[in-house]
Amino acid sequence: MRASQREVSAASAQGDMPLLRALELIVEFPVPGRQPVRAVNGVSLEVNRGEIVTLVGESGCGKSVTVRSLFGLLPPPGRLIGGRVIFDGLDLSGMREEQIRKTCRGMVGYVFQDPMTYLNPVMSVGAQVAEAMTGHARSTRNPDARDRICELLSDLGIGDPTRVLESYPHQLSGGMRQRIMIAMALSRTPKLLILDEPTTALDVTVQAQIVDLLKRVQRRAGVGVLFVTHDFGLVAEMADRVYVMYSGQVVEEGPVRRIFSSSRHPYTRGLIDCVLTTGERKESLRTIPGEVPNPRAALTGCRFASRCLSKKSQCEVESPSLTLEADGQVRCWRASSEIESPAIEAGGSGYPGLVTGTGASWGARNEVQAHSKTAELGRPAGEATIRVESVTKSFPVRGGAFGGSKALVRAVNGVSLEIANGELFALVGESGSGKSTLGRMVVGLDEPDKGCVTVGGRDAAEWTRNRAMRPMCQMVFQDPYSSLNPRKLIRESITQPLANFGFAHDAKSLAERAAELLEQVGLSPAGEYLDRYPHELSGGQRQRVVIARALAPEPLALVADEAVSSLDMSTRTQILGLLRELCDAVGLSILLITHDLAVVSSVADRTGVMYLGRLYEIGPTEAVISQAKHPYSRALISAVPLPDPVKARQREQILMQGEAPSPVNLPSGCFFNPRCQHATELCRSTEPQWAEIEEGHFVACHLYD
Amino acid sequence: MITALNLLRQSRSAMCGLTLVLFVVLVGVAGPMFLDSPFAMTGDSFHAPSRESVLGTDDLGRDMLARIAHGARVSLIVGVSAASVSAVIGIVVGSFAGFFGGFVDEFLIRIAEAFQVIPQFFLAILIVALFGPSISRIVLVIAILSWPSTARIVRAEFLKMRNLDFVAAARLAGANNATLIFREILPNTLPPMIVNTSLQIAGAILTEASLSFLGLGDPDIVSWGQLLYNAQPFLRDAWWMAVFPGLAISISALGFNLLGDGLNDILNPRKRGQVR
């Protein structure tokens, strides 16, 4: 191994080759009894020393497979069947995977999306970092190596490295685990860092910290970075140069400013249009209709043609090649900086959106009764459908080996709010803020310890006790992959509530109603979807099915718990558009739960900011976002990436220190005080009271007493 | 059926196992149709394998091939029915324990543990010795001894799945507990169950053979263990009386074990794609 390293460094000294050059990579996945699936089809890319290159595209475009194929990390049965990889002057093609890994060990660091699956759950974190650094887990006992590891960890913003070294992966938060992964990747001072969606599973606030950290580390160490993401906002924050991938091919390449200011490929343009920011208004929710083509299908012509608005007849038959232009490359017959964006308004005509008036009676709405009690806070303009009154909820957690000592997780600590007919209310906060628990109480899956939750004037959990009742509030879940039973047909999932609640009895009317519901949420023609299994649909289509199922028993309200955070940008806007329409056209009340303020600003009427089970700011969305008062709200807003490479690099970001403390040991006074820059003695001792800043805009913070 | 075969073709051990199992089934089903009664004394005693009697004859001049073919029937019936009974008990106990949790879980899992801490084979001998051997009793004994492991697998799957969103969604769609358990969650636990059942069939065949070998089998039917038992006094003089039934036991146990392992490789999503 020594010898080969010497060889490599000798070669790298010779010329000014890029650090990494990949030429015409082709990756195939064999399918038993069929043609192999070609996931990557002739991708070439380059990363120079000290440069941050991003690879961006929707899911299913082959981004991850591309970066994994570079150094022999393809998941079996995938195989790199063509192309060359030249890393640091050394040609890796022709080497076996093991040989590649051996040669490049320590010179390339990988960071993946989910650190939990890449860290060994039975080894302490310190041992794993040590193993990555020296090859021996036991070197944590060596004081020299230990010091080096501690230094590395504290460089990465880990405040208490000696304690962290002793802990096991499950004891650490997601952000902390990702820092450990980065530490392992950096442990041998690599020349290239490959980051595969490293922040997708994290909260926006933690994402901002990690991005900031990566930028600093990169600048200091001067490593080349290949960053894979689906989020053009992050591209603007990080990238020097951008590769846009679509359906296994690079469709556009160029410096980040050029890509944002004058992209020449319609797909790039569409993706940029779909990015949600906190500055957007309701009208500008845009989406690219259609899906990435299935790589199993025979593809002729330009792969983007089916979704393109400026295609010609040539595009359908002849595949364009990647052509070199003044400032980058582009793969399009009609490439020009004036090309029309394929992104259309979510909700406009031609968009597969809500179809109303197809027999949806929504008779249930008449059951809404006026409620006599008035809540002082968070009161909507119209009549309230959902009413939450000083609700608290805690869960016991087992401690000790024999379940003896019990601790309480205080998930929700006194929340009151009301949501009107046809109102979309957004609840924002980091993970652990109790927003999902609140959502489960609104649909009645959990019952509050204190306080009460009513939907349409009735106790939200009444249906769990009385079989004759049905839930008046339904739920749309975060992960459309786990919220549909994988062994049931779409038809069965949708007819289940119809049959159980007596909306239809015979098979024929059940099928008709199910088809109506699917068409209503934009899955048309419904016949194509009814007899399929969930795994045969895309994420966005599944989420539509979940919404159709939720609408089946004609609820008054919906809780959408992170319903869009696992979706691609362009699908995300479609689903948000659909939710918005359900409010406007059908009069449904929606409680949208999210950690991402960018999601909120485009659709929500009002927004509440939640931290550790308590609401700290509530008001009309525009006011909360443009004139956020609470320091926590401001930090959340500042964490959202700006899809503008110029502004993103100029702005002053508010980075919160650390992560939310555990809801087991809550701080006294204002819960946010340990992380707040403005915290005073008063904040540490007394709870802040609500103050009305403007009409309907409330904040609970001592700064505004 | 064809898709199932295509899946099985992904794993060599599953295909080997399936071939062996099909061979045993074929012998058990078709053999008795063409061969003599296992009790008919067709030739000389202690006739070594020859053209007339391929596997030789026993001390009373009965054809070993016919006896082994009939034994295949018994072994398969015992194996499959014991594994099925054990699967039913295990599924009911495991799903209730996993789904309801808390006290129900504690109670049911303690019962399962009570069965697991008893020396199993000893209990089997005791029951058969006390109540007399019959094929249904042997099936029941084996099932009673083997359900706890099934129950634990089902329980673990239920614990994992009961908090998944599709279960909450079904609850919101008006499903009652029985629907949640048997229609929503249980179908999703099938892959590990199929694997486990296949391994349990192998185990049951072995247990039955061991009981019969000790002379505790049903004397009215021919089983492989019993053939071994009968062969004991003549081990030196008539090797074929012991070797062929022993081989039959090994082949069927190996077949179901290989099938189970292969199915595990195929059905386990984490291993999917690495199967060869």
Image: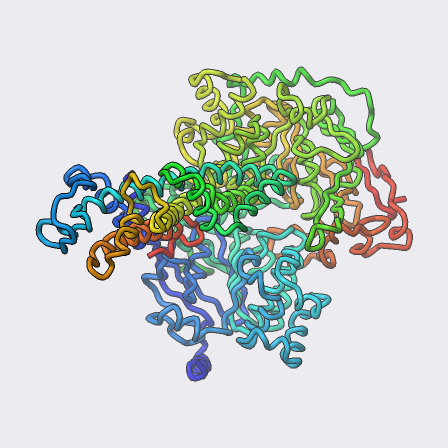
Tally of numbered tags? 0
Report whether B30 appears left or right of A76: left
On-image quarter of the C terminus of chain A: top right
Picture layout, residue A91 above or below residue B175: below
Coordinates of residue B241 in the picture (x, y in percent) = 22, 54
Picture layout, residue A65 above or below residue B142: below
Report whether A405 appears left or right of A45: right
Coordinates of residue B217 in the picture (x, y in percent) = 35, 44
Q: Nearer the viewer, residue A253 or B202?
A: B202
Residue A329 seen anywhere in this rendered image of the structure: yes
Report whether B147 appears left or right of A249: right
Picture layout, residue B141 above or below residue A653: above
Residue located at (84% from left, 30% from top): A376
On-image quarter of the N terminus of chain A: bottom left
| Coloring scheme used | rainbow
Residue located at (46% from left, 50% from top): B122
Q: Nearer the viewer, residue A63 or A591?
A: A591
Q: Nearer the viewer, residue A546 or B164?
A: B164
Q: Nearer the viewer, residue A527 or A587?
A: A527
Quarter occupied by residue A414: top right
Residue located at (63% from left, 56% from top): A174
Coordinates of residue B262 in the picture (x, y in percent) = 35, 52
Residue located at (16% from left, 48% from top): B61
Residue B10 seen anywhere in this rendered image of the structure: no
Quarter occupied by residue A215: bottom right
Spot the residue most to the left: B51
Coordinates of residue A546 in the picture (x, y in percent) = 53, 33
